[in-house]
Image (spheres, rainbow, N blue to C red):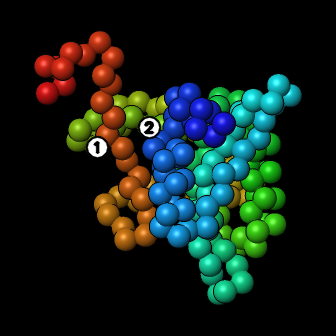
Amino acid sequence: EFGAFTDSMPYSHFTQTVGHYELKLAEGYETHLVGIKNNNNEVIAACLLTAVPVMKVFKYFYSNRGPVIDYENQELVHFFFNELSKYVKKHRCLYLHIDPYLPYQYLNHDGEITGNAGNDWFFDKMSNLGFEHTGFHKGFDPVLQIRYHSVLDLKDKTADDII
């Protein structure tokens, strides 16, 4: 169910796939698949979480490029993050880190902003839910994932166009 759902969503990253789940298990990480279903028993929001111990009692949870959800449905976003917070608290969460695969701004090759994706509301929503935005770091960091992704639109492109 998780794989079928994440494969069907427009903003789903490979770190939120069944293959990545299996990799994390094989690497020995405590790994959780968390989701919610609608009244038709269909998955409508989900995420892969990894957990590592902190001070032998607590855990640090991370949803790498997740959760996977219809971010246009603000009511669903509110509900899911509320429930996710409850879930990780039950598992002795000290800190939950998320970095959704959700466009915020569009930049050109020189790093200049060329457009806004219209997801500004998300920052206010997450703040109201008790989350803290840690900023738009640039460059490489030994702990944090990269902030910017280069995406090439392949629609209507031939193999020669791409190469």
Task: Name the residue located 49 percent from the left edge and 63 percent from the top edge.
Answer: 26
* Quadrant including the N terminus: top right
Position above or below: 15 against 68: below
Q: Would you call the spot at circle 1 few (<14 residues within 10 Å), some (14-19), or many (20 or more)?
A: few
Position above or below: 51 against 153: below
Element at label 1: loop
Q: Is residue 160 visible?
A: yes
Question: Where is residue 16 drawn, in percent x and y?
Answer: 53, 46
Position above or below: 153 against 90: above
* Quadrant including the C terminus: top left
Question: Where is residue 155 drawn, in percent x and y?
Answer: 33, 17
Q: Nearer the viewer, residue 163 or 142?
A: 163
Q: Nearer the viewer, residue 117 or 12?
A: 12
Q: Which residue is mark 1?
A: 111
Element at label 2: strand
Inspect the image, locate mark 1, and give the three-letter code of the amino acid beneath it. Gly
Q: Residue furthest top?
A: 156
Inspect the image, locate mark 2, and give the three-letter code of the amino acid beneath it. Gln
Task: Name the residue located 60 percent from the left edge and 52 percent from the top edge.
Answer: 48
Q: Which residue is mark 2?
A: 105
The circle on residue 30 is: none
Task: Name the residue located 71 percent from the left edge and 33 percent from the top edge.
Answer: 44
Dot 1 or dot 2, earlier in sequence: 2
Task: Name the residue located 42 percent from the left edge and 59 percent from the top edge.
Answer: 145
